[in-house]
Image (tube, rainbow, N blue to C red):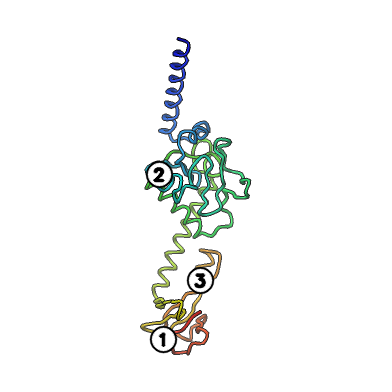
Amino acid sequence: MVLGARLLLGLALLAALLAVVLQLYRLRKPVRSLLLLLPKFSTGLPVSLSSVFDVTKGKSNYGPGGGYHHFAGSSWKLAKFQFLPEIDVIGSASTSFPSSDGLTDSLQGLSSMEVNSIVDWRKFYFERYIFAGKIVGRYYDDEGNPTKYLKGIEMKAKRGAQLLEKQKSEEAKIPSCNSKWSQQEGGEVWCETGYPRLVRRPGDIALTGQVSQRCACYKEEELDKAGLVVYEGCDYLSTSCKVS
């Protein structure tokens, strides 16, 4: 009798606990108790910018042995980008601290393009999976509202997207070179119309924090423009050039 009563009491407590969890799940509130409980019930809850998602339907990718298994579990880390923290959610529901391996949830120092990639990744999760909740900390306050930090991140991502579109539009005016590479012959660039030149991509400083070049095809009357570089070992009016 005593054993049966204890069993019934245990089942009742479990049912009550599940009811609370489900209610909190529906509210989508960043309640700490929910965050502490979730890892015990599911190992398929990755975090992107402190938004938590149920990826049960993607278990082949997020389960053990899956390509994205490192995203899920009670210790969560967006390892793809290597700057969000490894968070032991059972121990803490806050993300505003560096992890023991030196990673942090701060995006300071990242280019606008990199930040835009992260925000796009979060957008993919919202479109693909069930939103499970938020983690209180750097990105969300106790009421689940976005912090100034998150709003700043989203603005930086928006600027990155705008700069990327502007760069694409500018580069579309001057066609890129054709290119090929083989182990036997090495690399080659060529133009069907015009002459191959190396030119700086002016938007890259703002987008990536680095300077890069691309190969573009210029008409003969455009070859005296500042900033155009002839490939080493290539004739001035050659339509194709060998590259290392």
Marks 3/1: CA–CA distance: 24 Å
Q: Which residue is mark 2?
A: 59
Q: Residue at x 44, y 31 (%)?
A: 24
Question: Judging from the image, what secondary structure is the residue with disc 2 in?
Answer: helix
Residue 112, above or below 184: above
Which label sits in the foreground, 3 or 2?
2
In depth, the one of 191 and 188 nearer the eye is: 188
Marks 2/1: CA–CA distance: 51 Å
Question: Judging from the image, what secondary structure is the residue with disc 1 in?
Answer: loop
Q: Residue at x 46, y 45 (%)?
A: 64
Marks 3/2: CA–CA distance: 42 Å
Question: Judging from the image, what secondary structure is the residue with disc 3 in?
Answer: loop
Residue 200, above or below 32: below
Q: Which residue is mark 3?
A: 202
How packed mark 2 is, by other alpha carbons closer than 10 Å (few <14, some 14-19, many 20 or more), is some
Q: Which residue is mark 1?
A: 239
Residue type, label 2: Lys
Residue type, label 1: Thr
In depth, the one of 68 and 231 nearer the eye is: 68
Residue 234, above or below 93: below
Q: Position of residue 203 (x, y in %)?
A: 50, 68
In depth, the one of 190 and 113 nearer the eye is: 190
Q: Position of residue 188 (x, y in %)?
A: 44, 80
Q: Position of residue 38 (x, y in %)?
A: 48, 34
Q: Which quadrant is home to the N terminus?
A: top left
